[in-house]
Image (spheres, rainbow, N blue to C red):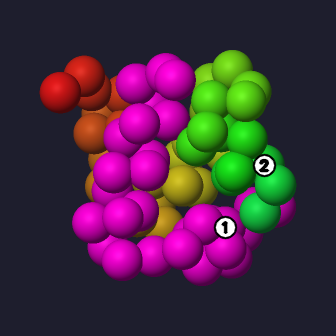
Amino acid sequence: MSTIAQNIKRYRQKKKMTQKELAEKAGIDFFTLSKVETGATSNPTIETAMKIAAALGVSMNHLMKEK
């Protein structure tokens, strides 16, 4: 699993959101988010990552940053 996938999952869980809730808030398809978060697909597009970051209330740097 990529760093961005791990970070999305970590921030989502920290905010006590389901994947469905995050997908709706970000305005993206649930299956797209699921694939990104589980690592079933490579890194998301910049546009998708920006929507996810905004929905989580974090910067892109936080999503890209390794622990």
Identify the secondary structure beneath mark 2.
helix
> Is residue 44 something one can see in this rendering?
no
Q: Which residue is mark 1?
A: 23
Instruction: Residue at 67%, 74% (x, y): give it.
Output: 20
Callout 2 crowding tier (Cα within 10 Å): few <14, some 14–19, many ≥20: some
Which numbered tag is attached to residue 7? none
State yes or no: discs 2 and 1 in contact (Cβ < 8 Å). Answer: yes
| Residue type, mark 1 in image | Ala
Identify the secondary structure beneath mark 1.
helix
Q: What are the residue bounds of the magenta stretch?
A: 1-29
Residue 64 position within the rendered picture, expressed as x and y whole percent measured from the top left: 36, 28
Residue 61 position within the rendered picture, expressed as x and y whole percent measured from the top left: 30, 33
Callout 1 crowding tier (Cα within 10 Å): few <14, some 14–19, many ≥20: many
- In this view, 14 is above or below 41: below
- In this view, 12 is above or below 44: below
Q: Quadrant of residue 27?
A: bottom right
- In the rendered view of the protein, which quadrant contains the C terminus? top left
Instruction: Residue at 54%, 74% (x, y): give it.
Output: 18
Side (left or right) of 16 relative to 51: left
Inter-mark Cα distance, 2 to 1: 8 Å
Side (left or right) of 31 relative to 61: right
Residue 2 position within the rendered picture, expressed as x and y whole percent measured from the top left: 49, 21
Q: Quadrant of residue 4?
A: top left
Q: Main secondary structure of the magenta part?
A: helix
| Residue type, mark 2 in image | Thr
Q: Earlier in the sequence, mark 2 or mark 1?
A: 1
The answer to whether residue 23 is magenta is: yes
Q: Which residue is mark 2?
A: 32
Residue farthest to the left? 67
Residue 16 position within the rendered picture, expressed as x and y whole percent measured from the top left: 36, 77
